[in-house]
């Protein structure tokens, strides 16, 4: 399956996976980072985890976000996206800690 097909499956509410891009039909993850989710009203909301938004995560994640934007009803700054979607953007703990509101990646700390 191709990444573009995973994004289309997410938009249609179906589970799919291709490498490091996965969806359960309700959320879309790039690696362990939630980059998109379906709102309670069914709208596709994408967190802009890219360099222009001040949240560069990786080149691959930026490509995944760009694909997700093609099906988005709304694109949000990552801070707002995280707050609105229960403050949880990671699928698994990154360092053994409890999953919670993400902090800005260390290479972006001001």
Image (cartoon, helix red, strand yellow):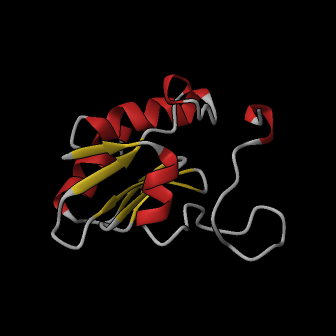
Query: Is 57 left, or right, of 66 in this rendering?
Result: right
* Residue lying at 54% horizontally and 37% vertically, measured from the top left: 61
Q: Name the quadrant containing residue 39.
A: bottom left
Seen as rendered, the residue at the extreme right is 96
Q: How many marks?
A: 0
Query: Is 77 left, or right, of 110 in this rendering?
Result: left
Residue 29, relative to residue 106: is it above or below?
A: below
Seen as rendered, the residue at the extreme top is 52
Where residue 13 sits: x, y (%)?
22, 65
Residue 42, relative to residue 66: is it above or below?
A: below
> Is residue 102 in view?
yes
Where residue 65 sits: x, y (%)?
42, 37
Residue 20, relative to residue 110: is it above or below?
A: below
Which residue occupies the foreground of this view, 89 or 87? 87
User: Quadrant location of the N terminus?
Assistant: top left
Query: Is 90 left, or right, of 68 in this rendering?
Result: right
Which residue occupies the foreground of this view, 74 or 8? 74
Seen as rendered, the residue at the extreme front is 110
Where residue 12 sits: x, y (%)?
17, 59
* Residue lying at 21% horizontally and 42% vertically, measured from the top left: 71
Residue 7, relative to residue 55: is it above or below?
A: below
* Residue lying at 63% horizontally and 65% vertically, measured from the top left: 101
User: Quadrant location of the C terminus?
Assistant: top right
> Is residue 21 in view?
no
Where residue 51 sits: x, y (%)?
56, 25
* Residue lying at 32% horizontally and 66% vertically, measured from the top left: 15
């Amino acid at each position: 399956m191709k990444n573009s097909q995973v994004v289309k499956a997410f938009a249609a509410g179906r589970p799919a996976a291709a490498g490091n891009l996965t969806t359960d039909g309700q959320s879309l993850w790039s690696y362990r980072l939630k980059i998109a989710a379906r709102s309670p009203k069914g709208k596709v909301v994408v967190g802009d985890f890219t360099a222009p938004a001040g949240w560069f995560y990786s080149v691959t994640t930026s490509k995944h976000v760009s694909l997700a934007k093609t099906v988005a009803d709304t694109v949000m700054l990552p801070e707002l996206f995280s707050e609105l979607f229960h403050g949880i953007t990671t699928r698994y703990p990154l360092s053994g800690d409890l999953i919670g509101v993400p902090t800005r990646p260390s290479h972006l700390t001001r």
